[in-house]
Image: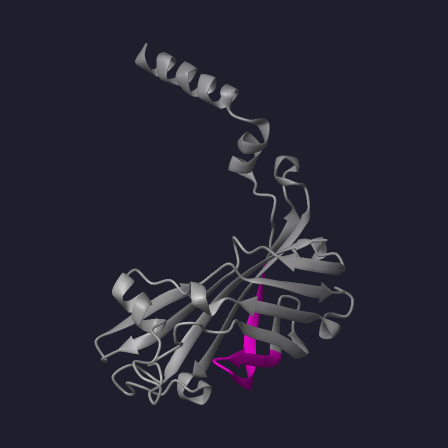
Amino acid sequence: MRRILASAAALAIVGTAPLWAQGAASCPPGQKNAALVTGGTYKADPGHTLVEWEVNHLGFSPYFGLFGDISGTLQLDPKAPQNAKVSMTIPVSKVTTVNQALTAHLLRGPKDAASKPDFFGASPADATFVSTSVKPKGKTMADVTGNLTLNGVTRPVTLAVNFYGAGKAPAQMGGAENIGFEATTTIRRSQFGMGQMIPMLSDEVKLKIAAAFSKQ
C-alpha cells in the first residue's frame, strides 16, 4: 500500500512540473556534438561566463577566486574554425573571493602617491582578450592565441580551448542557439605589473574559463 501511495505522489509531482522541465530531466538541450554548431555571431552570456584564477598560497594550498559578469562576442563558421574571432571584456573591479578582507586587498589603492597597490588598485580598468589566431586540434579542441590586456599591460596568451556543448535553449528560456567552451592557460602576474609577494604567492596564475554564448 505504501508503495502505491508513493508512486501516486511521484506521478502527481511530475504532472504538475512544466513540460520543458520534465524533458530536461532526461536530456539537456545542449549536447557535446559539433554537428549542432551553426555559423554566425554569438554574444557572451555574462551570467554563465566565468574566469577562475588560482595561485599557490605559501606552498601550503591553492587559493582561487572568480571574475564574472563578462561580456564579449564570438564570430564562428564551423566550416572554417580557423577563422573564428573572439573578443571578451572582464570587469576586474568585480573580482570575487570568499574572504571580504582579501577581496578588498585585491582592490586596495596606494596608501600614498609614491606607492603602488599590491594587486589591482581601487579603480582597475577592465581586462580584455582579443584573439589573433585559432589553430584547430581535431573537431572539438583548438589553441586560441590572443592579446590579453590586464593591469595596463598587453601580452600574447594562448588558451587551450575545448568545445563543451551546443544546441537550442528551451522556448521558455528564449529558444536561442547556444554554444559553450572550456579553456585553460597559465600566466605570470609579474609580467602584468603585479610582482608583489612572490614567491609567498606564486607568480604563476592558473586560469580556468567557462564561456557561454548565445547566437544573435
Which residue lies at the image location 28% right of the left edge and 68% below the top edge? 102
Q: Is residue 24 left or right of residue 13?
A: right
- Residue found at the very far top of the displayed protein: 1
Q: Main secondary structure of the magenta part?
A: strand
Q: Is residue 146 magenta?
A: yes
Q: Is residue 158 magenta?
A: yes
Q: Is residue 9 above or below residue 20?
A: above
Find residue 187 and report its horizontal and vertical position in percent: 45, 82
Q: Viewer-proximal residue, 29 or 147?
A: 147
Q: Is residue 79 left or right of residue 3?
A: right
Q: Viewer-proximal residue, 134 or 31?
A: 134
Which residue lies at the image location 44% right of the left edge and 72% below the top edge? 123
**Count of numbered tags:** 0
Decide if residue 101 is in sight here: yes
Find residue 58 and report its horizontal and vertical position in percent: 22, 80
Find residue 192 and report its horizontal and vertical position in percent: 45, 85
Which residue lies at the image location 39% right of the left edge and 84% below the top edge? 194
Place residue 80 in its image quadrant. Answer: bottom right
Work out which quarter of the rendered image holds the N terminus and state it. top left
Find residue 124 and report its horizontal and vertical position in percent: 46, 73
Q: Is residue 131 above or below residue 32?
A: below
Place residue 180 in its image quadrant. Answer: bottom right
Q: Is residue 216 above or below residue 17?
A: below
Q: How is the image coloured?
A: one colour
Decide if residue 143 is in sight here: no
Magenta stretch in the rendered image: 145-164
Q: Viewer-proximal residue, 1 or 25?
A: 25
Q: Is residue 163 above or below residue 18?
A: below
Q: Is residue 78 left or right of residue 140?
A: right
